Amino acid sequence: MRILLVDDDVALCELLSEYLVSEGFEVIAVHDGTQALAHFNEPWDAIILDVMLPGMNGFDLLKAIRPISSTPVLMLTARGEDTDTVLGLELGADDYVAKPVSPRVLVARIRALIRRGASDEESPIIQVGDLQLNEQARQLLVDGHAVTLTGAEFNLVALLVKSAGHVVSREQLATDGLGRSLQAYDRRIETHMAQIRRKLGPLADGSARIQTVRGAGYQYVVLYQ
C-alpha cells in the first residue's frame, strides 16, 4: 500500500516513514506543499497531509485534489482547534488527527481509512426509499433532485443512512462525522441536524426523515410498505 506523507517536519517524517515501512507500507515523503501537488496524480492508497506547509498549505492542497481524486486523506497537524477540524472535513478530508500522535495510532487510522475506501468502491451507492447516496462521488439525491450539503453534513447523513432504521449515537456522529469527540454542552450535532432536516425535507408521508431518540441519538427513518 502506497502512502504519500506531506509534512515539513523532516524528523517527524523520518520517524513516521520508518514505522509505516515496518508495517508494510511504501512511503514517499514530501516537505513542501507545491512539490506535493506534483505527486497527487500518482496512485496512492492514502495521503497524510499536514496543514501548515511552505509553498501551499494543506487546505489549499486538499481543495486542489478533491475534484480529481477520492483517495483517503488524513489531516495531521499541530493545530487542533474545532474550526480547523471542521474546515478540513468540509473540504473533503476523511480523518483529522492532532499532533502529537503515536505512530501505532496513526497506522490504525490509516488502515481504517483504506478499508473504508475499499468498501465504498465495492458499493458506492446506497438507496433508502427516495434517497440515494453516493459516497464515492459525495452526492445525495432526494426524489431524483440533488441536495447541496457541506462536507460535515454529508458525513453525518452518510452515517445515518448507512444505519437506516437504527439509532446512531451523538458520540459516534461527532467522532466519525465531525472528527472530534463531544465536549460538555456541545450543540454541534443538534445544529447540523437542524440544517440537514431543512435541506432533505420530510418523507413522502410528511413525517420527519431523521428522528431524535432522546438519550440515545438519531435515526434515519425507514418507511416499510
Image (spheres, grey):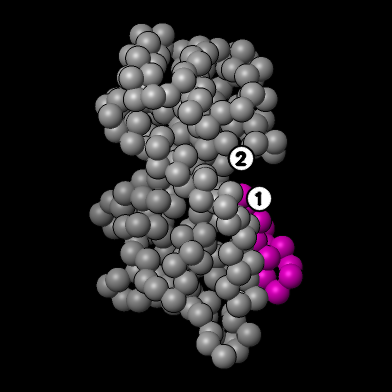
Q: Main secondary structure of the magenta part?
A: loop
Q: Nearer the viewer, residue 119 or 102?
A: 119
Q: Residue at x 25, y 54 (%)?
A: 184
Relative to 192, say whether 85 is above or below: above
> Taking 12 as reference, is 45 above or below it?
below
Number of residues whose C-alpha sits closer than 10 Å to that of mark 1, classed few (under 14), some (14–19) or many (20 or more): few
Residue 55 versus residue 75 in the image, above or below:
above
Q: Amino acid at mark 2?
A: Ser
Tag 1's secondary structure?
Answer: loop
Residue at the extreme top of the image, as rendered? 10
Q: Give the Cα distance between marks 1 and 2.
A: 8 Å
Which residue position holds label 1? 137
Element type at mark 2: loop
- Residue in front for this viewpoint, 40 or 198: 40
Residue 211 lies left or right of residue 35; in this view the side is: left
Quadrant where the C terminus is found in the figure: bottom right
Residue receiving disc 2: 70
Where does the magenta region start and end? 136-150
Dots 1, 2 in contact, CB < 8 A: yes
What residue appears at the point 50 percent right and 32 percent down from the top-left corner? 46
